[in-house]
Image: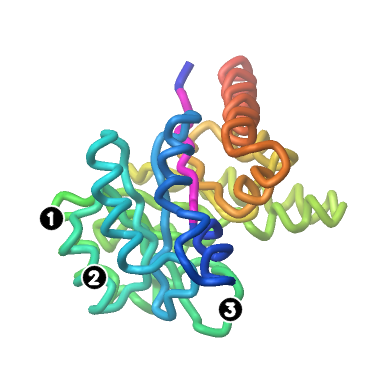
């Protein structure tokens, strides 16, 4: 069975900490607990306004992940400042995402078509330093082709619209969006890109996404951190891993 990797985003542990100030709850401790519970890596988004993860968190997370032999996936805007921070830490992985100060969370994928001249040099710089670079994009054929042309070898498909439609009970729209994700994953894989997926995934939606044959990794954060309030991080991650593995068995049985 080919195992779909799970990256756990611990941003919102930092959100809770920052709501009151101080040092608790500690996102680094959450990262350590997530890896102990079966996460294959840790994702953290260092935003321009430092609304959750801060620079000191990245320092500690980078050390922890190196010590545990697990990748730190640094989500970041495509800016000189963020590129400099990434180059100083040499994370095992980095994901370029769009960022607007007024958004609550990342809204949609990176526009690689328009941003090629900025994105491609940043991809080259990080990959040259040994970092695996992914681009967070919509499952749109033009964006996927543009991502391939930057030299990045990984795309992360934005699953938020599908998850929102599914939770809203809009079965027809959810079916269309899921098919778009499937087609996008097949196209990206055909171009030689590794396919990841993330945003808005929960227990109800993970099966369909993990069941896409080309998907190699899921990055899930907000839902797992919220669920951990009620059942603990170990149990939340354990159930998510179980659902992912069930989906993988199903897709291999179909193939």
253 vs 109, left or right, is: right
**Residues under numbered marks 2 and 1 in contact, where contact means CB atoms less than 8 Å apart:** no
Residue 219 left/right relative to 82: right
Location of residue 228 by image quarter: top right
Judging by the rendered image, the residue that carries numbered circle 1 is 129
Tag 2–tag 3 contact (CB < 8 Å): no
- Hey, which quadrant is residue 118 in on the image? bottom left
**Above or below, 117 relative to 108:** below
Q: Earlier in the sequence, mark 2 or mark 1?
A: 2
On residue 220, the disc is none
Magenta-colored stretch includes residue 4: yes
Read off the residue under disc 3: 103
Density class for disc 2 (Cα within 10 Å; few <14, some 14-19, many ≥20) is some
Residue at the image position 58 percent from the left and 63 percent from the top: 16
Find the magenta span and give its range. 3-10
SS assignment at label 3: loop
Task: Quickly name the residue at label 2.
Answer: 83
From the top left corner, tell me how far across and down residue 187 is, in percent.
Answer: 46, 46
Disc nearer the start of the sequence (3/1): 3
């Amino acid at each position: 069975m080919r195992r779909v990797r799970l990256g756990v985003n611990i941003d919102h542990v930092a959100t809770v900490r920052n709501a009151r100030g101080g040092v608790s709850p500690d996102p680094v401790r959450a990262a350590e607990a997530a890896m102990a519970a079966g996460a294959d890596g840790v994702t953290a988004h260092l935003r321009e306004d430092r609304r959750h993860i801060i620079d000191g968190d990245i320092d500690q997370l980078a050390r922890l992940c190196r010590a545990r032999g697990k990748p730190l996936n640094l989500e970041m805007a495509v800016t000189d400042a963020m590129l400099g921070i990434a180059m100083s830490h040499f994370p095992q992985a980095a994901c370029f995402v769009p960022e607007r100060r007024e958004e609550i969370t990342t809204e949609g994928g990176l526009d690689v078509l328009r941003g090629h001249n900025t994105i491609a040099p940043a991809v080259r710089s990080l990959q040259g330093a040994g970092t695996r670079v992914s681009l967070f994009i919509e499952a749109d054929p033009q964006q996927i082709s543009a991502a391939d042309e930057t030299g990045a070898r990984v795309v992360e498909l934005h699953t938020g619209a599908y998850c929102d439609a599914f939770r809203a009970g809009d079965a027809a729209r959810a079916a269309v969006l899921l098919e778009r994700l499937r087609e996008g994953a097949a196209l990206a894989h055909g171009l030689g890109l590794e396919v990841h997926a993330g945003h808005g995934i929960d227990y109800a939606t993970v099966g369909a996404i993990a069941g896409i044959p080309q998907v190699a990794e899921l990055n899930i954060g907000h839902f797992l951190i919220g669920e951990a309030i009620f059942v603990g991080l170990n149990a939340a991650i354990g159930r998510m891993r179980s659902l992912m593995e069930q989906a993988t068995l199903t897709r291999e049985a179909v193939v």
